[in-house]
Image (cartoon, rainbow, N blue to C red):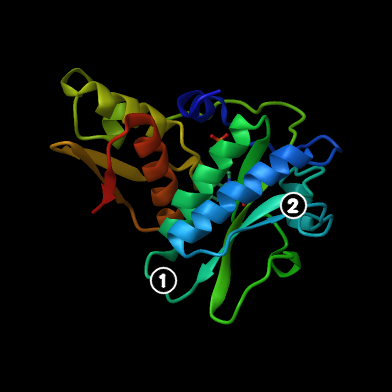
Amino acid sequence: MNIREAIKARHSVRQFKDMPVGEAEAARLREIIEECNAESGLNIQLIENDPDCFNTMLAHYGKFRNAVNYIALVGSKSLDDLDERAGYYGQRIALEAQMLGLNTCWVAGTYGKGKCKADTAAGEKIVCVIAVGYGETEGVPHKSKPLAKLCAVKKDDMPVWFKNGMLAATLAPTALNQQRFFIDIDGEEAVITAQRFPLAKIDLGIVRYNFEAASGHKCRAK
Ligand SMILES: Cc1cc2nc3c(=O)[nH]c(=O)nc-3n(C[C@H](O)[C@H](O)[C@H](O)COP(=O)(O)O)c2cc1C
């Protein structure tokens, strides 16, 4: 599975099989996490076999089952773009997980924040987590807004790279599937803006990563 296939195949999965992440898969996840941390300055961590983090009323209400592994997106509160960075690198890791045959779900609300086992150094915080494991199912595609609501360029006027990027952007996970972003073209680059709401910057980073991975062109935040 290549990255574009992974972008298409990824859907949120909240119910997992009762089996641990394979050794080779966990090792590869740790490797990519290390790469992402070195590049981003974040302190992302893979936590395995923790029955507590998703053992809360909210998580049960949110239909999580056997969610015992997760990627904690941790970073310094002093970074102006902490949320966006967590979104960007978290999505890179989530897509790698998909390519390894795993399933994921981004979670900012329905987990036990106080129960999360991630280490936080002084001045750091947990932005959110990504549940990871072998899904009971592969999940289902989300409903997407029409392209005209997400993008300034008409479909017929889009260069191929931009069309590929936009398709990947529409397939990106966003909080409550709100898709409150807008993308324009500027020469050989895309420019993305997000509306103001609490999780907007995490979504912005996720969508930027999807766009860049599928198009091979930069997508910069305005
Ligand atoms: C930043 C962010 C936070 C999210 N928080 C939660 C959450 O707290 N609980 C949950 O069940 N799903 C959560 N989701 C998953 C979204 O509901 C899901 O991505 C969206 O409905 C689109 O569906 P898809 O991921 O299957 O494409 C979150 C997604 C994102 C991007």
Q: How far is the residue under mark 1 from the one under mark 2?
A: 29 Å
At label 1, counting other C-alpha atoms closer than 10 Å, the crowd grade (few under 14, some 14-19, many 20 or more) is few
Instruction: Please tell me whether mark 2 sits on a helix, a strand or a loop.
Output: helix
Image location of residue 135, percent across then percent down: 74, 32
Residue pictured at 73% horizontal, 38% vertical: 24
What x and y, as percent, mark residue 150? 30, 36
Q: How many marks?
A: 2
Q: Amino acid at mark 1?
A: Leu
Q: Nearer the viewer, residue 44 or 182?
A: 44
* Mark 2 neighbour class, 10 Å CA radius: few under 14, some 14 to 19, many 20 or more: some
Label located before the other in sequence (1 or 2): 2
- Residue annotated with mark 2: 59
Instruction: Name the spot of residue 183 as percent of width and height, x first.
Output: 26, 40
Cβ at disc 1 under 8 Å from ligand 1: no
Badge number at residue 79: 1
Name the quadrant containing residue 102: top right
Quarter, ligand 1: top right
Quarter of the image where the N terminus is located? top right
Q: Amino acid at mark 2?
A: Ala
x and y percent of residue 215 in the render?
Answer: 32, 31
Give the position of the C terminus as an image quadrant.
Answer: bottom left
